Image: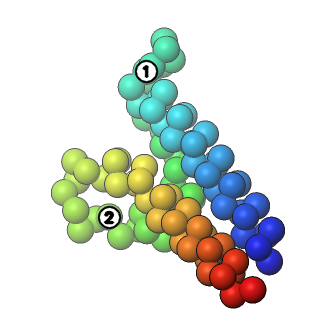
Amino acid sequence: MRALTSGLFWALVLAYVVALGGYLLGQFGLFGTPKDPLAGVFLIPLGLPWNRMIDVFPETSWPWLAALAPLLNILLVALLRRGLSRSR
């Protein structure tokens, strides 16, 4: 089970880094890439269910909170991984 949670953790981290990089490139047009209004679309499924709860914050902070929401899932998997390693 530890190997499964470890693999899930690193897969989430890799997916998050790639999606966040795509978001930053598309949002700000870095390195000559065209600006894309849908640049953060890959962050949405990574941040579920937390990004469904950001509407209580000011609307100007929504894009940044949606970009940070996947970190909560990564934290939960890390805590699960840590808890499983201590149980043995």
Quick one: label 1, few (<14), some, or many (20+) residues within 10 Å? few
- Is residue 2 shown above or below 66? below
| Label 2 SS | helix
Q: Which amino acid is tagged 2?
A: Ile
Residue farthest toward the bottom in the current orientation of the protein? 87
The residue at the point 70 percent across, 77 percent down is 85
Q: Position of residue 34 (x, y in %)?
A: 48, 19
Q: Quadrant of the C terminus?
A: bottom right
86 and 12: which one is in front? 86
Residue farthest toward the top in the current orientation of the protein? 32
The residue carrying mark 1 is: 29
- Is residue 68 shown above or below 24? below
Q: Quadrant of the N terminus?
A: bottom right
The residue at the point 44 percent across, 59 percent down is 69
The residue carrying mark 2 is: 54
User: Is residue 13 among what the camera can see?
Assistant: yes
